[in-house]
């Protein structure tokens, strides 16, 4: 019912939230992570203690926030949400931590973007459930120790490699989320269609799944766009033909590459002769932030075999040239 209400209000974010699985058993795919996490949580419940801190890494849209919410739900604890960029001062973090209760779950999205002083405060909080709040400046500054209740930190990052060692080491459980297989995305699309009341054929579901870039968030989004198309231009049923036409209209290609993905390989091949080219140069060429190219576009391009990261820079593979309908020049790095 929440889904229908959110839809009625046309609120895409609310729809996305309503499509989230609520319990570990409802999560599709990520079998290993699910099993590992389930053990961590069951053991903590058995001991009646807050579970160890959890670090989730992986590209956007693979389920990090969803898992954080599930951890809290499975523990029967409230979840507090914040993000690295929102914590600019150590004081921001101290305020959040001091407002927590026993066994709360604190979710920090984009934890690699936290400021240095906040990060250092977090080390201590994670390890000793205590922080030092510094009052005043210069020689007269004093540190006042503040006890905080035992809590579980769930950190999410698109780049585990960017976390400083001491922070990474304080997580008792680290999981890397991988892109989903088409069969898993197929199940996700069907589940979401059920919740949204969308009628879809087997081949329609499979088509959306195979063009979803290995990403549940994209699968759900494409399902809604194809549903719109089916509703306006046809009889409302998401069939293979409707899925093809809608996805072509939204410029999602047969392999799931979107505009940014294509812009990256296009620049790499046409402007830089296939590379190697540095990340910053490539980002400027496609008019995007370096981080967006690196954290959003590249993981999928690498996994699809279109782009390779080498010590000298980014390189297009023969598959990339072929995908663009171009011929790789003689003497290209491959
Ligand atoms: P992240 O935090 O990694 O960016 P989210 O947890 O916000 O990703 O997930 C994005 C969307 O994808 C959510 O709305 C959720 O409905 C869906 N989703 C993610 N993982 C799964 C999964 N394993 N099974 C079903 N749906 C999922």
Image (tube, grey):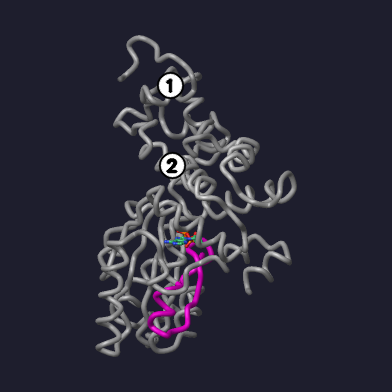
Work out whether residue 59 or residue 33 is closer to the camera in this orientation and state it. 33
In front of the other: label 2 or label 1?
A: 1
Left or right: residue 254 compared with residue 41: right
Q: Is residue 45 above or below residue 300?
A: below
Query: Looking at the figure, which quarter contains the C terminus?
Result: top left
Residue 14 lies in the magenta-colored region: no
Q: Residue at x 38, y 72 (%)?
A: 24
Q: Tell me the CA gap for discs 2 and 1.
A: 22 Å
Q: Earlier in the sequence, mark 2 or mark 1?
A: 2
Q: Residue at x 42, y 26 (%)?
A: 320
Q: How many marks?
A: 2
Query: Looking at the figure, which quarter contains the N terminus?
Result: bottom right
- Say which element carries label 2: helix
- Regarding residue 88, the answer to whether it shows in the image is yes
Q: Is residue 320 above or below residue 196?
A: above
Quarter of the image where one finds residue 306? top left
Left or right: residue 73 compared with residue 221: left
Measured as percent of width and height from the top left, residue 313 is found at 36, 29
Measured as percent of width and height from the top left, residue 204 is found at 54, 46
Q: Is residue 3 above or below residue 255?
A: below
Using the image, tell me which numbered label, if any, was put on residue 322. 1
Work out whether residue 144 or residue 25 is closer to the camera in this orientation and state it. 25
Rate crowding at label 1 as few (under 14), some (14 to 19) or many (20 or more) other CA atoms within 10 Å.
few
- Say which element carries label 1: helix
The residue pinned by badge 2 equals: 294
What's drawn in magenta, residue-wise? Answer: 69-90
């Amino acid at each position: 019912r929440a889904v229908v209400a959110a839809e009625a209000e046309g609120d895409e974010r609310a729809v996305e939230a309503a499509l989230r699985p609520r319990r570990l058993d409802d999560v599709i795919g990520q079998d290993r992570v699910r099993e590992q996490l389930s053990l961590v949580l069951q053991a903590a419940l058995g001991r009646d203690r807050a579970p160890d801190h959890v670090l989730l890494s992986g590209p956007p849209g693979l389920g990090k926030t969803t898992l954080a919410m599930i951890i809290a739900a499975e523990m029967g604890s409230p979840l507090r949400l914040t993000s690295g960029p929102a914590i600019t001062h150590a004081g921001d973090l101290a305020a959040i931590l001091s407002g927590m209760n026993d066994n709360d779950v604190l979710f920090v999205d984009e934890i690699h973007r936290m400021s240095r002083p906040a990060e250092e405060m977090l080390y201590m909080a994670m390890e000793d459930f205590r922080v030092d709040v510094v009052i005043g400046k210069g020689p007269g500054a004093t540190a006042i120790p503040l006890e905080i209740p035992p809590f579980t930190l769930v950190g999410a990052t698109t780049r585990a490699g960017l976390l400083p060692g001491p922070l990474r080491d304080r997580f008792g459980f680290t999981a890397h989320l991988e892109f989903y297989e088409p069969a898993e995305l197929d199940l996700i699309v069907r589940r979401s269609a059920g919740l949204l009341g969308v009628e879809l054929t087997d081949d329609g579901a499979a088509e959306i799944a195979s063009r979803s870039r290995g990403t549940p968030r994209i699968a759900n989004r494409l399902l809604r766009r194809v549903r719109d198309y089916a509703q306006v231009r046809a009889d409302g049923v998401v069939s293979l033909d409707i899925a093809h036409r809608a996805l072509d209209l939204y410029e999602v290609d047969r392999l799931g590459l979107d505009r940014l993905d294509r812009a990256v390989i296009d620049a790499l091949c046409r402007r830089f002769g296939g590379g190697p080219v540095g990340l910053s140069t490539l980002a400027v060429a496609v008019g995007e932030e370096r981080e967006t190219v690196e954290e959003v576009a590249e993981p999928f391009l690498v996994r699809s075999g279109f782009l390779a990261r080498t010590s000298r820079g980014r390189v297009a593979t023969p598959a990339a040239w072929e995908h663009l309908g171009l011929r790789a020049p003689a003497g290209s790095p491959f």
